[in-house]
Image (tube, rainbow, N blue to C red):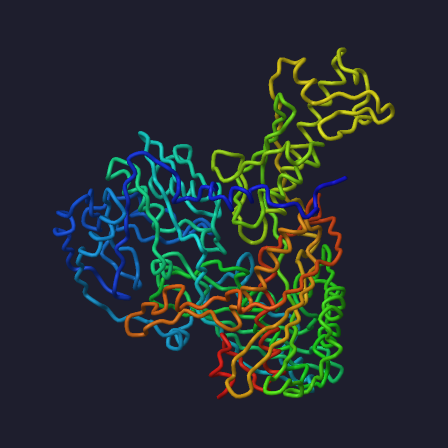
Amino acid sequence: MSVTGQPLNRVDGIRKVTGTATFSAEHKIPRLAHAVLVTSTIPSGRITRVDSAEAERMRGVIAVITHLNAPRLPSAGKAAAGEPPAGRVLNLLQDDRVHYNNQPVGLVVADTFEHAVDAARRVRLTYHAEQATTDFEKAKLQQVDPKKAKNGPADTNRGKLDEGIAAGVAQIDAAYRTPVEHHNPMEPHATIAVWEGDHLTLYDSTQYVTGDRNTVARTLGISPDKVRVICPYVGGGFGSKGSTWSHVVLAAMAARRAGRPVKLVLDRPQMFGPVGHRPHTEQRMLLAAAKDGALTAVRHNVVASTSFQEDWLETSALVTRMMYAAPNQQTTHRLGRLNTGTPTFTRAPGEASGSFALECAMDELAYELKVDPVDLRLRNYAERDPEKNKPWSSNALRECYRVGAERFGWAKRDPRPMSMRNGNTLIGMGMATATYPANRSAATATARILPDGSALVQSGTQDLGTGTYTVMTQVAADALGLPVDKVRFELGDSALPKAPVSGGSQSVASVSPAVQAAAAAVRDKLVALAIADRGSPLAGASAADIASDNGWLVLTSAPDRREPYAAVLARHGGRPIEASAEAKPGSEKEEYSMHSFGAVFAEVHVDAELGEIRVPRISAAYGVGRLLNEKTGHSQLMGGVVWGVGMALMEATEYDLRTGRPVNANLAEYHVPVNADIGVIDIVVVPEKDAQINPLGAKGIGEIGITGVAAAIANAVYHATGKRVRDLPITLDKVLT
């Protein structure tokens, strides 16, 4: 029986719970020194003076590096820019410019972490401050056209918008706002840099070992084959570790200066600025509909914040382009530049923020038309991608609506706002659609059958805690015909076969076909050895007549003719055999539009006097192709829903507009959900076959879980209170005012 899809426990679970899984900051390296960042305290200006004398005299200090003495890099260290997702404009101590508060402006290297921290506090910098833009309300007045939105245009038009607006009998025209949010993985960004001659090894917490290697090599001006990146475990990334940031290159620079390995770990406040965030958005939504609820016009205008260093775009309107069958539509994206660090990918970038605006507007339209919110969405269901005019590779959204509503008990909802309560508690029910693109990139893998009959399978992908080790082991075991405990999967090393970034929910969709192909290829090699071997009971058989059964080759027409893998190899010198394979997309994206879909239903309880909001239960149904592990898949989707609760009710980075510095740059004041905030989360994956996405029919699930959740909760809050909050997070003051 196939093990792919079964709810197997994580193969790395024992290592995780016993503390033997080695994260990036935990590698034991001889003669390890420690580096600590010095960051700026103004949002814009120049460094006019550096006083590092006291720090340099302190016990254990090896080096104090600033722009005055940092090694000069090719292209002034700007070679990393311009190649997302690995490339960013970095701050590598090449000049005296300050672009944002908390920017790396110095580095102290010492023999111990404590000595480095103490000395870093004694590095004194004097600045010439310049006019800074720290307020998004002002930045959005000077809008910049980004020209592109991911792989498409920043703006789109279809049909005749003005005619569509005029044709509508009901209209919603409102602005929705989302704040800056920071990723805050439990494991902070961390790098250990080790030089051996002109070869550099980086133990880096990254979502892209190959991209990390290439970016660092390019920035330092050395060949990529002289850089190796190792990352067997990632303690959370959520997009922030998909790019190579300044501290990674700075660690390499510090190790070369110190003449010994150097560890650099960002402290929690340093996670706010130098390593990205989800930006501010202001999204103006206009929906017009006919009397029967059919959309006649949709307009989605997005303004998002970015930095002065780099124009990075939160593509919030992309979800609107493909979600509903509207004949007349316009979408635009604009940027407002701030003196902050550059934004970056944050779980479901664009779709998480965009679905909040779109799905809240759809809820408002449902009330305006006095139509059930689920029914309104079904009336505007897109039978094919309305923007690309292509059929879906698969789309189980109708079933998601049906199953989600049934499990939630949507039919029991009284549609009137403030109509449902229990004593002093107002009860609200809301729903929203979830979606995320089904992405896939080229990936390679190698499979090796070892002399003892077990197997080693390798690919240079990453496990962010999502279960990649486990899922790839399952896929390989099935293709090899081996039990799971006889297969070992290795990842997290740029020396392994190349795989794409673990971002865009594409690791499973990209890497599992390569693993499957490599495993099948090496099994075919083993079969060829056996049938050509006169000493084998399978000699002379047809390869098509040979099956694999728990490490045995078996002739299906005569099952008593069988032989273990190890015996075949033993007669051929006892050497392992291996095969490599590449799997990549073909022309299917030219023929089909590929997305995952879901439906989210949320219940909220609101204290009528205090405005306190609780979310006792959420039901969510998803169509994500073939789920390769029922247990880890459920966990990923649940994790996305939990983050959606945080997005709806808690998360926001607050800035001091005088200094441009985050004032809640810690986990005590940057609020994220804890166990007490989360009620029952009911997840179901509906059956869905997608023969186009890849040979396994598997889509990514890492990001769809957050989409739609904030809107479902916001819609439930309106149903409970009659108060429409369009500005996240929904805090009690916004409900009460």
Question: Which quadrant would residue 164 be assigned to in this image?
Answer: bottom right
| x, y percent for residue 406 | 76, 70
Please state if 112 lies on the left or on the right of 455 as rendered: left
Question: Which quadrant would residue 389 be assigned to in this image?
Answer: bottom right
| x, y percent for residue 115 | 22, 48
Residue 588 seen anywhere in this rendered image of the structure: no
Residue 67 seen anywhere in this rendered image of the structure: yes
376 or 266, nearer to the observer:
266
Please state if 704 lies on the left or on the right of 538 as rendered: left
The residue located at (33%, 30%) in the rendering is 196
| x, y percent for residue 561 | 82, 20
Please state if 96 lies on the left or on the right of 139 as rendered: left
Q: Residue furthest right?
A: 557
Please state if 112 lies on the left or on the right of 434 as rendered: left
Question: Which quadrant would residue 27 be assigned to in this image?
Answer: top left
Counting every numbered tag in the picture gives: 0
227 or 318, nearer to the observer:
227
- Which quadrant would the N terminus be assigned to in this image? top right
| x, y percent for residue 334 | 47, 69
701 or 561, nearer to the observer:
561
The residue located at (44%, 39%) in the rendering is 230
**Does 545 appear above or below 104?**
above
